[in-house]
Image (cartoon, grey):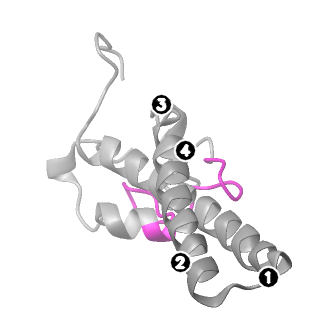
Amino acid sequence: MPSDRPETREGQPGIAEAALLGLCPRCGAKTMFAGMLAFSETCRACGLDYSRFNVGDGPAALVTLAVGTITVALAIWVELSLEPAWWAHALLWVPLTFVLVIGGLRVTKAWLLASEFLNDAREAGSRDL
């Protein structure tokens, strides 16, 4: 089994590459996600246990607040400058918000998992990981 120590691994992707492409931070295989937002239990290529990482709800709060701020600012700007019909706002902002939240959440969750792995992060008081 390959070592989990960051200084002994070669060829692993960087944090940004792993996050954007959903790559295993240990071996670089595209195995991080089992679905759109759900992590796989383990990497099918190298056996890295993804369930040991605690990503939590931080990414959801961060992405929702950021996308909400950007979307509302753009919607106000469009309303004040173009004055479109209400249905035009619905056609524009609902799908855009959905895509930005899902895409941002996927990248942010992957970024945090890869960061935890590459920095050898552990729960406070944990010795067995």
Please state which amino acid type lies under the numbered disc 1.
Ala
Q: Would you name the residue on which mark 3 appears?
A: 52
Which residue position holds label 1? 88
- Residue 57: x %, y % from top left: 53, 35
Mark 4 and mark 2: span between their CA atoms? 26 Å
How packed mark 1 is, by other alpha carbons closer than 10 Å (few <14, some 14-19, many 20 or more), is: few
Q: Please name which of the two marks, 3 or 1, marks the residue nearer to the observer.
A: 1
Type of residue at label 4?
Answer: Ala
Residue carrying label 2 = 77
Mark 4 and mark 2 lie on one chain; the one further toward the N terminus is: 4
Looking at the picture, which amino acid does disc 3 mark? Arg
Residue 9 lies in what quarter of the image? bottom left
Residue 115 vs residue 82, the one in the foreground: 82
Q: Earlier in the sequence, mark 4 or mark 3?
A: 3
Q: Nearer the viewer, mark 2 or mark 3?
A: 2
Q: Which mark lies nearer to you, 4 or 2?
A: 2
Q: Residue 47, labelled with which disc?
A: none
**Can the viewer see residue 28?**
no
On the rendered structure, is 19 left or right of 61? left
Label 4 sits on residue: 60
Residue 32 spot, x, y in % from top left = 55, 55
* Mark 1 / mark 4, whichever is N-terminal: 4
Q: Closer to us: mark 1 or mark 4?
A: 1
Q: Indicate which label's residue lies in the foreground, 4 or 3.
A: 4
Residue at screen point 63% across, 78% down:
79
Dominant SS type (magenta): loop
The magenta stretch is 20-39
